[in-house]
Image (cartoon, helix red, strand yellow):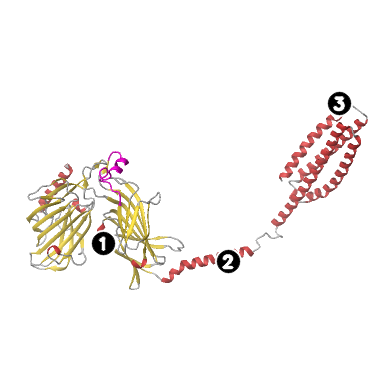
């Protein structure tokens, strides 16, 4: 409260000096009716002015002044002429042109706006002017932090006197509050509080730049939904659809929540244990909206409902958790609209006629970015917005785009529902360009099928006269030859095993004749195998592809022959010993040295066979 008192003291001193300064013109305000609406987070001040020209010269402009603490929060200002009388009066036509001006000999603590009249106000003439000023972030939570169970109290400061460079003859002020509960308010003579409306008695003969500070401390638990940034993307498809995608970065702009959050208390008594939190938002979409979705980074959010008729479509969305002061959330809303409701033609150009602001009720937007994505091939692009915005163009690439789609970007800060007016984006577009993407698909599939046909009928094998093909054929022949040698050696080893088996039978049965018969059959087998090896080895010796494997093959053949000779010698020795009827120990002594060599050779032959088998 001390900060507010100091602020009000400074304003009082500043405007006390201004009240003695020269009058800006001969205009006087015969009657001023001010109505201040504090029922939401947005402060709306509606002022009805009866302006009279008491001078001799025509007047073409009227000045409106705002103190510094209000000017920095001013989001929207409009002034319209009122041609009616009494309570049923109605403003006529669009708002009058307004712009910021800097008159001479005026301190920096005041901001002036000039309202230009369509025709000058002559001597003795009067007019009725309705002024609507909309402010954001003008209500300050007090206390700044509250617990889950506390209600939200706000402070609002203003002047009871209409701050103007002109003399005011009669003025009244009425303040509309959201609740009947008021903690405190500045009491002046004749002040009356009736329910949720606070009235200050009429003031008479107010000098220029008069400032009478007032402070109201009241309860307001309305949703303080503030979008830190909202990006609206409006994509036009000449195939009959307008796709709207809105990305919200939202937070609760009211009194910050302190302490822990109890889900149990909130669910049991949500309007008592969470009075300042907001649980749902309502978005008023255009009629005939379709394909509506509501999601965030996690995925689709099912806590939403949609209903509508031929005049409107309402989407009620509920975040994943209630939002208390200072809490944040981010989500995306998307929907489609019929193209014919928003795209028109005029003077050889097409133009999109669409609303600028957010469809969510009573939402304050710190930064709003509207992106209008036009079809590829659009040219001569321009935008018409009923209020000042930053504007530029960029390019977006989508499916089947060659040069990209032009995008008109509009940016504005401090946006309120009053900015939800229609704007237009004009462009030229050749209807034949609509055939570009279908033709691309047709020709794309056509060439794909042609390529498949060519591939299926083309001979992509390597030429039989090329060096690589010949080398491949030679290597396959070498592999086949090595495999044949491997099989022959395997047969030889099988014959060796038969000789060993005949010797074991001889030791068991003593049948020398059967052992000799086995020896005879093995001899004939090995002689035939030896003849088969010669041409194979000769081929390997003549092939350059076998250079790295030939030494191993020759080593294998040599060791197999050595093994074969030693086995034959062993067999001859054992048979002779049996014919001479020598004892078993004597036989073992005669073949002992030869047997060790046979075992070693057999192991070496097996290792070489494994090596060649891997190749």
- Of callouts 1 and 2, the N-terminal one: 1
Instruction: Say if 99 sits above or below 159 in the image.
Output: below
Q: Position of residue 602 (x, y in %)?
A: 79, 37
Magenta stretch, overall SS: loop
Badge 1: residue crowd in 10 Å (few <14, some 14–19, many ≥20): few
Which quadrant of the view contains residue 363?
A: bottom left
Q: CA distance from mark 1 to mark 2?
A: 56 Å
The residue that disc 2 covers is 450
Left-right relation of 441 to 427:
right
Frontmost residue, 34 versus 473: 34
- Of callouts 3 and 1, the N-terminal one: 1
Badge 3: residue crowd in 10 Å (few <14, some 14–19, many ≥20): few
Q: CA distance from mark 2 to mark 3?
A: 85 Å
Farthest residue in the right direction? 580
The residue that disc 1 covers is 387
Q: Position of residue 409 (x, y in %)?
A: 34, 60
Q: CA distance from mark 3 to mark 1?
A: 122 Å
Q: Which mark is residue 585?
A: 3
Left-right relation of 300 to 55:
right
Q: Residue at x 7, y 67 (%)?
A: 124
Instruction: Say if 67 sits above or below 570 in the image.
Output: below
Secondary structure under tag 2 reads helix
Q: Is residue 261 visible?
A: no
- Of badges 1 and 2, nearer the viewer stands 2
- Of badges 2 and 3, nearer the viewer stands 3
Q: Which residues are magenta?
A: 258-280
- Of callouts 2 and 3, the N-terminal one: 2
């Amino acid at each position: 409260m001390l900060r507010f008192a100091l602020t009000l003291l400074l304003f009082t001193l500043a405007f006390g000096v201004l009240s003695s300064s020269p009058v800006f013109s001969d205009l006087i305000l015969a009657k001023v009716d001010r109505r201040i609406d504090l029922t939401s987070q947005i402060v709306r001040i509606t002022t009805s002015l009866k302006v009279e020209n008491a001078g001799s010269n025509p007047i073409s402009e009227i000045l409106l002044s705002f103190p510094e603490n209000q000017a920095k929060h001013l989001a929207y200002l409009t002034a319209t002429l009122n041609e009616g009388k009494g309570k049923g009066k109605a403003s006529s036509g669009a708002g009058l042109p307004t712009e910021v001006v800097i008159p001479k000999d005026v301190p920096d603590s005041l901001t002036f706006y000039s309202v230009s009249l369509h025709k000058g106000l002559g001597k003795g003439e009067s007019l009725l002017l309705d002024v609507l000023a909309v402010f954001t972030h003008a209500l300050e939570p007090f206390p700044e932090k509250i617990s889950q169970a506390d209600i939200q109290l706000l402070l609002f400061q203003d002047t009871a006197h209409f701050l103007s460079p002109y003399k005011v003859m009669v003025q009244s002020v009425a303040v509309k509050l959201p609740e009947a509960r008021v903690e405190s308010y500045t009491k002046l003579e004749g002040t009356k509080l009736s329910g949720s409306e606070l009235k200050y008695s009429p003031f008479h003969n107010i000098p220029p730049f008069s400032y009478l500070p007032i402070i109201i401390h009241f309860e307001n638990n309305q949703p303080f939904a503030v979008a830190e940034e909202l990006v609206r993307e409006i994509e036009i498809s000449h195939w009959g659809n307008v796709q709207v995608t809105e990305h919200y970065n939202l937070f609760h702009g009211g009194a910050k929540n302190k302490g822990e959050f109890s889900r149990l208390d909130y669910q049991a008594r949500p309007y008592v244990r969470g009075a300042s939190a907001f649980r749902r938002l309502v978005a008023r979409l255009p009629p005939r909206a379709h394909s509506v979705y509501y999601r965030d980074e996690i995925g689709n959010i099912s806590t939403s409902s949609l209903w509508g008729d031929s005049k409107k479509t309402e989407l009620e969305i509920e975040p994943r958790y209630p939002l208390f002061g200072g809490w944040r959330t981010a989500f995306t809303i998307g929907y489609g609209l019929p193209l014919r409701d928003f795209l028109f033609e005029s003077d050889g150009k097409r133009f999109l006629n669409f609303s600028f602001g957010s469809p969510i009720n009573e939402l304050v937007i710190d930064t709003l970015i509207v992106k209008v994505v036009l079809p590829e091939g659009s040219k001569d692009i321009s935008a018409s917005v009923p209020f000042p915005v930053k504007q530029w163009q960029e390019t977006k690439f989508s499916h089947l785009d060659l040069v990209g789609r032009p995008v008109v970007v509009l940016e504005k800060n401090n946006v309120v529902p009053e900015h939800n007016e229609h704007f237009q984006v004009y462009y030229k577009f050749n209807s034949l360009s609509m055939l570009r993407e279908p033709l691309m698909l047709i020709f794309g599939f056509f060439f794909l099928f042609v390529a498949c046909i060519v591939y299926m009928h083309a001979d992509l094998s390597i030429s039989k006269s090329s060096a690589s093909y010949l080398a491949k054929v030679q290597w396959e022949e070498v592999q086949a030859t090595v495999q044949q040698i491997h099989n022959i050696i395997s047969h030889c080893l099988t014959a060796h095993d038969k000789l060993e088996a005949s010797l074991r039978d001889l030791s068991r049965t003593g049948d020398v004749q059967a052992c000799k018969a086995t020896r005879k059959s093995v001899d004939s087998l090995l002689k035939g195998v030896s003849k088969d090896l010669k041409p194979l080895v000769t081929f390997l010796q003549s092939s350059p592809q076998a250079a790295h494997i030939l030494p191993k093959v020759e080593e294998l053949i040599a060791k197999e022959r050595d093994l074969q000779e030693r086995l034959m010698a062993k067999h001859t020795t054992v048979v002779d010993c049996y014919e001479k009827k020598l004892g078993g120990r004597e036989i073992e002594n005669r073949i002992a040295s030869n047997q060790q060599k046979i075992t070693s050779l057999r192991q070496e032959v097996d290792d070489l066979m494994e090596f060649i088998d891997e190749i």
